[in-house]
Amino acid sequence: MTQSRIEDYGLIGDTRTSALVDRSGSIDWWCVPEVDGGACFANLLGDESNGHWSIRPTVEVTRTERRYIPGTLVLETVHHTDEGSVAVLDFMPLDSAGPSIHRVVQCRSGSVPMRMEMIVRFDYGSITPWVQNTGDGQVLVAGGDGLRFLSSAHFEAHDFKTQSDFVSNEGHRHHFSLTYFRANERAPLPVDSWAAYHRTLRRWHEWTENCRYAGGWRKDVVRSLITLKALSFSPTGAIAAAATTSLPEQIGSVRNWDYRYSWLRDASFTLKALLIGGFDAEAEAWATWLRRAVAGHPGEFQIMYGVHGERRLSEMEIPWLTGYENSTPVRIGNAATQQFQLDVFGEVMDTAYTAAVAGLRAETSDPNAVILALLEHLEKVWEEPDEGIWEVRGPRRHFTHSKLMAWVAFDRGVRLSEMGAFDGERAGAWSQLRDEVHAQICAEGWNSERNAFTQYYGSDELDASLLQMAPVGFLPPDDPRIVGTVEAIQEDLMVDGFVLRYRTEARHDDGEPGDPAHVDGLPPGEGAFLMTTFWLADNLALMGRHDEALEIFERCRGLVNDVGLLAEEYDPKAKRFLGNFPQAFSHVSLITTAALLSGVGLDPVHERPLARR
């Protein structure tokens, strides 16, 4: 069976974990019991034998339509056939004791023959469970994992899969559900799927009714906010970067990473997006999780954590999965946790400053103590080389963006002192360091021949991360050096209207020991990055070039799939999504760029008003 494209998937979730459903009605990815747990449906990265759950007509489908019920994460897929039309409603209740997927089959016209097929394989498709029939369903157990399956249709189990052939008649419904439980505990009692459907609609509507976004493109912004909510982990306030691991940045490549964790780098961007939407509770929970995650010695904090705040996210490869379209290796865990990335200091400090300006409550006993320790540590390490924002697996360098964010950290420390967050004793030293970092970047990061700031000191390569220089307030948007950098990036890093992060192919060899002649230490090739393309629009908007910014924004917005979701990257040649999906950074950027173009953005650095009551 042909593997579905990334853009063919829809997302369902319950703010603990999430699943991907393709257009044909197959759930090909579901991690249990949490977003970074082992997948019990892993067809996305292997084949059907690694686990999937499909419900589809057995006759030819002439047309398929999908949508989310407005204001919710309830996915409705309608299949049209010559025999009639049938809808499949897929959702995960927000109030169940354990993660639970419900699937309601509802015939809209005629009589449509259907088939349900379920293959459960725990631990990323590697473990076949022991199955016990219960009359109304099954209990499936292996090791510490258990699933309770319920079916209103007759089913049979054979060849290590569960199958049901039934006819969906107009005006009738069939219900199926699958609920996770710990295998050493009692299997959960049956839950009425139709009642759960109405509860889930109500809970989502209650949430989206609190959205205070007042700018343009509201439908797209609300859908992106719902996606962020779905990627959140409500027990702690963390937000996962994506729902998946190892979806490739280039088909057939080795650029396959696990994004089911929370990055400190996402912090300030995500916080602003939540505040733009008016979701203060989620913003406070995210900021509080961030402070807890980095608590301890500042020299030991990581660039990312598990959704509970776990630090040990050891990277390993899974050899039994063939990878999405044979893109191997499939990885779980992320070795970038061990990298030194200087820029995260700036992102954490920008989050603290944004939270203070927005008046968010801090749910920690002494939040400023963590910030003070962080800045004191940064004073000692800001001149060191690092792996940078893109987590290169090549040599450490003095990346210009990393130094930029060190400047941001000291700048926000000064600003917080001016707001009374500190007693001011250290503010003088931070102000002096801020000036020192600024002068160094302008001297070492600037390349007069290219008329642009470059990727790292002494380099002539460009990097889209430098599109953050004006938005963070390092230089005015109309400064000739900013204009030169933006125009150089437009000329060198744009492909068919989209922005690459940087050039991954080798264009010169600087002769450093162990340098593979390209900066990130990996084979060349990847798609255009959606977040950096939104960043280009932001810069043009700040320069007053609104029409150009709007054109780029509309180009990116036009990529959302039929249910409004974005991946990490886009291949403008093949016209398809690449990278993990859905990607929080892409949706955050859609929200913040829409707000900027609408004039309702949250931007305390440039003294624009907060989007709050």
Image (cartoon, rainbow, N blue to C red):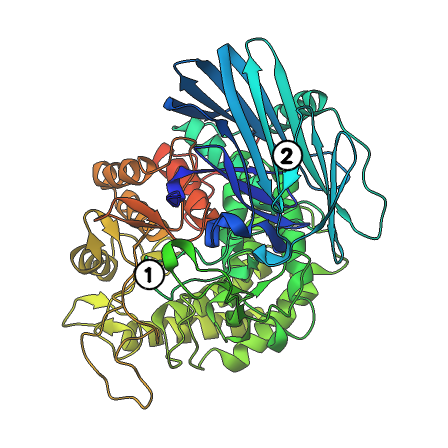
Residue depicted at x 43% and y 69%: 391
Q: Position of residue 249 (x, y in %)?
A: 36, 58
Q: Secondary structure at mark 1?
A: loop
The answer to whether residue 93 of the structure is visible from this angle is no
Q: Residue furthest bottom?
A: 513
The residue beneath circle 2 is 92
Residue depicted at x 44% and y 77%: 386
The residue beneath circle 1 is 252
Q: Secondary structure at mark 2?
A: loop
> Along the line of sight, which residue is nearer the eye, 609 or 25?
25
> Along the line of sight, which residue is nearer the eye, 488 or 502?
502
Q: Residue furthest front?
A: 158
Residue depicted at x 55% and y 9%: 170
Q: Is residue 91 left or right of residue 477?
A: right
Q: Amino acid at mark 2?
A: Met
- Mark with earlier residue (1, 2): 2
Q: Residue furthest left?
A: 449
Q: Position of residue 411 (x, y in %)?
A: 48, 63
Instruction: Reply above or below: 287 against 519.
Output: above
Q: Position of residue 468 (x, y in %)?
A: 36, 57
